[in-house]
Image (tube, helix red, strand yellow):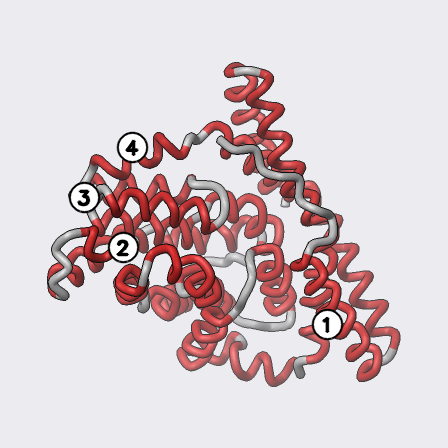
């Protein structure tokens, strides 16, 4: 696995954040006075104190998961199985795949080229977007709380498999009989 | 809060033991990934929380509650689904803003519809990654297969939350 480059402390995205926060701060002060500004900062400190210990743990989990779950293994499971079993494996694989969109789409692209079942690929991507355990641990639990996060997680559990089943039947109806006709 | 801490740090412990049994180099790599990811958050996270607070201050609370509040019902769920699909950016900005809105009185079913739409539709991600990498047929098939999920998630949670308390 390639080592990620050390990201700079102040990159473009962060500068956008700075600009948004600054303009928001100016507008808020202008409309609601400096008390509103103080209130925002006090609120921020309180939230930070609450989420920091959870996010630190979440980041460690993210790092550990990325070295412990090799992408090649995920790719092997997804490529060989079809049917209902394939959809269930895709669901689990999607939920545990760490990292951003680049890695997941690259994996699906590669599997599409070698003819993996389209239902499995759609189920994998859908599970990855809705269930992502990494996002659950790093963001959702710290910010929205365990009960809310668990409720949403359970609610989203069937989505990958259902999407996979729908995708299979749609692909058949639209005449896209080969996965390579869809992923190209 | 305590339960979250126990779960998160328990998971760190379990994964850490597995990694350490493999090799210290594995642990070192994991730490490096975690720390690198954390570096970008040191500035972004406080800023994102501030942005959320300012947004809530600038949008009239009654308007927000009227459109996607607890009482907004199905219309609110549909509006939240549309808003979620247009919300750009990753979790570092979306969750702090979501929590600010939640505190300002956005309904739980509406918030669930919004977050589901943000993760399933994600037009920004579709444009930047999916379209160039996967092509139009894949996007069409994926969206057609999951289009109903965000409003459906909102409706199901509105029904379920009559019996479950998650706040």
Rounded to the nearest angstrom, the CA distance separating label 2 from label 4 is 20 Å
Q: Where residue A57 appears, x then y in whole percent?
A: 63, 37
Tell me: A172 left or right of B27: left
What's the mark number on residue A84? 3
Labels 1 and 2 touching (C-beta < 8 A): no
Whole-number angstrom distance, CA of label 3 to CA of label 4:
17 Å
Chain of the residue on which disc 2 is drawn: A
The percent coordinates of residue B33 (x first, y second) are 60, 35
Whether A48 is drawn above or below A6: the answer is below
Task: For mark 4, name the chain.
Answer: A
- Disc 3 is placed on an element classified as helix
Whether residues under marks 3 and 2 lie with C-beta atoms below 8 angstroms apart, the answer is no
Q: Who's the residue at 83% across and 82% down the image?
A: A30
Q: Quadrant of residue B79?
A: bottom left
For the question of whether residue A167 can be seen, the reply is yes
Contact flag, marks 3 and 4 (Cβ < 8 Å): no
Q: Are marks 3 and 1 in contact (CB under 8 Å)?
A: no
Residue B99, x across and y down, in percent: 62, 62
Q: Give the CA distance from mark 1 to mark 2.
A: 44 Å
Q: Nearer the viewer, mark 1 or mark 2?
A: 2
Q: Nearer the viewer, mark 3 or mark 4?
A: 4
Q: Are marks 2 and 4 in contact (CB under 8 Å)?
A: no
Q: Earlier in the sequence, mark 2 or mark 4?
A: 4
Same chain, labels 1 and 4: no
Circle number at residue B31: none
Question: Which one is in front, B88 or B80?
Answer: B88
Residue B7 visible in the picture:
no
Q: Which mark is residue A184?
A: 2
Look at mark 4 in the image and give the residue it sits on: A76
**Do the residues marked 3 and 4 share a common chain?**
yes
Q: Which mark is residue B54?
A: 1
């Amino acid at each position: 696995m390639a080592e990620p480059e050390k990201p700079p402390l102040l990159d473009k995205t962060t500068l956008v954040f700075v600009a948004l926060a600054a303009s928001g701060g100016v507008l808020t002060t202008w409309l609601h006075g400096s008390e509103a500004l103080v209130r925002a900062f006090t609120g921020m400190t309180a939230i930070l104190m609450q989420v920091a210990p959870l996010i630190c743990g979440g980041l460690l989990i993210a790092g550990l998961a990325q070295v412990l779950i090799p992408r090649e293994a995920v790719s092997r499971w997804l490529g060989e199985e079809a049917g209902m079993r394939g959809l269930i494996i895709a669901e689990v694989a999607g939920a545990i795949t760490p990292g951003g969109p680049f890695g997941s789409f690259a994996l699906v692209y590669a599997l599409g080229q070698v003819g993996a079942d389209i239902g499995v690929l759609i189920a994998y991507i859908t599970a990855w977007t809705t269930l992502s355990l990494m996002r659950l641990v790093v963001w959702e639990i710290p910010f929205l709380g365990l009960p809310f996060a668990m409720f949403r997680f359970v609610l989203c559990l069937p989505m990958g498999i259902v999407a996979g089943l729908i995708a299979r039947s749609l692909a058949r109806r639209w005449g896209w009989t080969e996965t390579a006709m869809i992923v190209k | 809060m305590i339960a979250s801490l126990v779960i998160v740090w328990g998971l760190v412990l379990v994964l850490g033991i597995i990694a350490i049994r493999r090799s210290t180099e594995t642990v070192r790599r994991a730490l490096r990934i975690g720390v690198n990811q954390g570096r970008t958050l040191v500035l972004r996270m406080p800023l994102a929380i501030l942005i959320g607070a300012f947004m809530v201050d600038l949008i009239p609370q009654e308007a927000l509650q009227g459109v996607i509040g607890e009482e907004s019902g199905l219309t609110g769920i549909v509006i939240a689904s549309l808003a979620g699909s247009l919300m750009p950016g990753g979790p570092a900005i979306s969750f702090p803003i979501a929590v600010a809105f939640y505190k300002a009185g956005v309904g739980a079913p509406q918030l669930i519809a919004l977050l589901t739409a943000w993760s399933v539709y994600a037009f920004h991600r579709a444009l930047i990654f999916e379209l160039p990498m996967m092509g139009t047929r894949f996007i069409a098939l994926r969206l057609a297969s999951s289009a109903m999920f965000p409003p459906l998630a909102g409706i199901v949670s509105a029904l379920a939350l009559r019996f479950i308390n998650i706040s």
